[in-house]
Image (cartoon, helix red, strand yellow):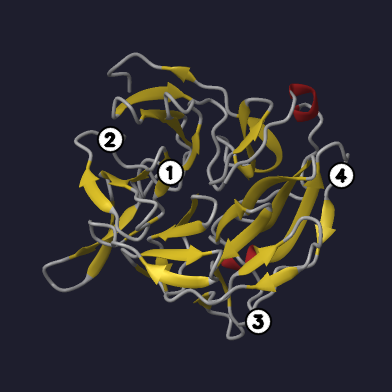
Amino acid sequence: MLMTSLTQAQANTLPALPEPLADAAVLQTTVRGKTYILSAGGRSAAANNLTSAHRKSWLLTYGDSSWLPLPDIPSAQGATGRIAASAVSLDQQFFIFGGSGQGRNGQPVTLTDSYRLSPIGRMYQKLPDMPVAVYGSVALTYANRYVFLIGGNHQGNAVNLVQIFDNFTQKWSQATPYPMTAVSRHTAVLSNQQLLVCGGVRQQVNTDGSISPQEQTDCYLAQLNRQQPSQLQWRRLPDGPGALLDAAAINIGSSDKPQALFVGGHNSLTSQTTNQTGWLFDFSKQSWQQTALPEARSGSRYLLSIGNEWYSLAGIDKSGALMADFSKQQFSLLPDGAP
């Protein structure tokens, strides 16, 4: 999701978005020495009101004092908005996959179309449709070629699929599925040939045949193979952060000490309070440590690397207010066993 860092002086002058947003796709890439941030789609009003979803997009070039409005994200289904899309930066371009919106009949619909956007040309190019259209999936890039779409929802039903888009061939394929029950609202990160998936919501089948959502507390790790990227060797980690919903994640370690930081979201289905405790995962030690994150936000599932620090854009702060600005995610490690 993240590309080149900027100097701290540049980070301090980053302007807020034209309006407060939650659940937008936020991406970063660098082309010909210039670094760009994209904000695409999201909600601009009450966080739980689907009718507030929109298709607006803005582009920020570092050094500029304001965001540039872009054409709206297209919609083959005529949806009025696009939220819970999965997005990545790859090959100096932005990719936006699926999402959810309000269809022509006024009902929520899983969006089937996906797009590539160049920060230079600033025009949307339609991508081949996903084999299974999803929203709330997590998208990650691998080997500067592949996009992995992990889990998500299809028409309200969670899936355990791992769908792969090959940017060289422009074709889709299916990888080894996620080993647990279908999951959405989860968090994932890819580092050092290892794919880590944690938390989210699974669908519990009750004795009467009904289905109810339940927090997913497990984490699974898959080893990747460049020669066979679709063959994932999954295993369950013995420890983890417990219930972790709608969080963001970013690689923050070095090549010899890969680490990932998990930020924000919620710790239960009934909680509307942003989680102020994050988690740091050490891939070498396969261990977790809790962190204090006083500026963490929900509704902001992407993190940016700016001036060797980490920022959220927009989202919902700990008071429940919808935000438009950047928030630096400073963290401190908590003692083992801290709540």
Q: Which of the two marks, 1 or 3, is nearer to us in this view?
A: 1
Sooner in the amino-acid sequence: mark 4 or mark 3: 4
Q: Which residue is at the front of the view, 199 or 164?
A: 164
The vertical placement of 199 against 83, above or below, is above
Sooner in the amino-acid sequence: mark 3 or mark 2: 3
Q: Residues within 10 Å of mark 2 (few under 14, many from 20)?
A: many
Residue 82: % across, % down:
61, 66
Q: Which of the two marks, 1 or 4, is nearer to us in this view?
A: 1
Residue at (47% x, 30% y) in the render: 276
Residue at (41% x, 54% y) in the render: 185
Asked which quadrant contains residue 229, the reply is: bottom left
Residue that carries the numbered disc 2 in the rendered image: 240
Residue that carries the numbered disc 3 in the rendered image: 78
Q: Which residue is at the front of the view, 176 or 318?
A: 176
Instruction: Give the amino acid type for the residue marked by disc 2 in the picture.
Output: Gly
Q: Is residue 256 left or right of residue 65?
A: left
Sooner in the amino-acid sequence: mark 1 or mark 4: 4
Whether residue 159 can be seen here: yes
Sooner in the amino-acid sequence: mark 2 or mark 4: 4
State how far apart marks 1 and 4 are (Cα).
Answer: 32 Å
State how far apart marks 1 and 2 are (Cα).
Answer: 16 Å
State how far apart marks 4 and 3 are (Cα).
Answer: 29 Å
Q: Name the outermost residue toward the top.
A: 335
Q: Name the outermost residue toward the front.
A: 227
Residue that carries the numbered disc 1 in the rendered image: 190
Residue that carries the numbered disc 4 in the rendered image: 66
Sooner in the amino-acid sequence: mark 1 or mark 3: 3
Asked which quadrant contains residue 323, the reply is: top right
The vertical placement of 148 against 74, above or below, is above
Q: Which part of the image, by quadrant, shows the C terminus?
A: top left
